[in-house]
Image (spheres, rainbow, N blue to C red):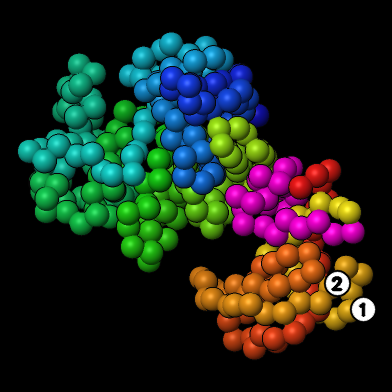
Amino acid sequence: MAEAVRLDGVSKYFGRTKALENISLILLDRKYHVILGPSGSGKTTLLRIIAGLEEPTKGKVYLNGVDSTHTPPYDRGVSIVFQEPVLFPHLTVEENILFPIEARGGKPSSARGELLRLARMLRIEGLLKRKPDELSGGEKQRVSIARALITKPRIVLLDEPYSNLDLSLREALRWEVKNILMSLGVTVVHVTHDQDEALELADYIHIIYKGRLADTGPRDKVYWSPATPMAARVLAHNVIELDGKCVVVPIDGVTLGSEQCSESFKASLIEARDRRGYRLAVYETQYGTVKVSAPKDKELPEQAFLCLSKYTILDEC
């Protein structure tokens, strides 16, 4: 499969601060890639390097097989959508969407057909004559996405684009936008700190932790068999030392079982809190705290045996 993005040994320093250190990564063409990591891990810096808004201190950036390390942003075939919709307040929605065409020296009228097509896909055709201050947060982000697509980029970068929207709108919009982007045949690189969002959307997950690549690969492989303890912790997995082994267990890889289970131990309930679609129970064990995913309608025992049904063993914790 063709490569859309290749990073070879990319590092980025801001003075003495190492934002990224020796990142080598391949992003396959026409796939939905998620860069996952906690705040301050270097995710947005990595996205800006792909976009050409920052140059790496070391290393090379290849886009669609071409060395683009020093190529200006407007020549990369890349568009970016930021966390905050950056719209010109004095322009209409239509003028905002067409602005990149005009900025490149083109005639906005030449892209009107594409404008109307994107407006229909994103369901903003009734908003084209409005100004940004007449739009909701979700409508503004739809306009930002249309503007990113109007130049027909091969790669679309999303920098936490839904994080400022309320939960129900965020969940609906991200699925709708993913379906649109995949139907257009573009490569998507989406930055987020939300592991639930990453697992819902990604074909491939790439985990950044403290400026380093902690894991990379197909979504299910990274989730069920993380390569490093850092990746496991970013995914909110349990990381415990059990009988001299470093054991990584997803929260849905632990069940409330019996002592007859091949890998089980006693546990005492500390707390439980509701999450989307499940209850997160936290138990105290001789190996430390262990998180368990349980149905919302299930009564949680104060004392239980935890059974490890799915886990990975790493060399060290």
User: Who's the residue at 85% across and 81% down the image?
Assistant: 258
> What x and y, as percent, mark residue 231?
65, 45
Which residue, given by chain and number where applicable, does mark 2 sit on?
264
What is the x, y in percent for residue 6? 58, 23
* Callout 2: SS: strand
Q: Is 307 included in the stretch rendered in magenta?
A: no
Q: Is residue 223 magenta?
A: yes
State the extent of the magenta-drawn residues as a range: 221-243
Judge by depth and name the residue closer to the eye, 128 or 298: 298
Q: Residues within 10 Å of mark 1 (few under 14, many from 20)?
A: few
- In the visual, does 5 lie left or right of 293? left
Residue to which mark 1 is pinned? 260
Is the residue under label 1 in contact with that under label 2 (CB below 8 Å)? yes
45 vs 161, nearest the viewer: 45
Closer to us: 108 or 142:
142
How far apart, in angstroms, are the residues tagged by discs 2 and 1? 8 Å
Q: Amino acid at mark 2?
A: Ser
Residue 316 in the image: above or below residue 46 = below
Q: What is the three-letter code of the residue carrying label 1?
A: Gln
How many circles with numbers are drawn on the protein?
A: 2
Residue 245 % position (x, y) = 86, 53
Write the residue at 41% across / 40% down.
Answer: 158
Q: What residue sits 32% from the left and 57% below the top?
A: 165
Please tell me in which quadrant of the rendered image residue 14 appears. Answer: top left
As drawn, is 223 to the left or to the right of 102?
right
Q: Is residue 154 visible?
A: no
Q: Is residue 52 visible?
A: yes
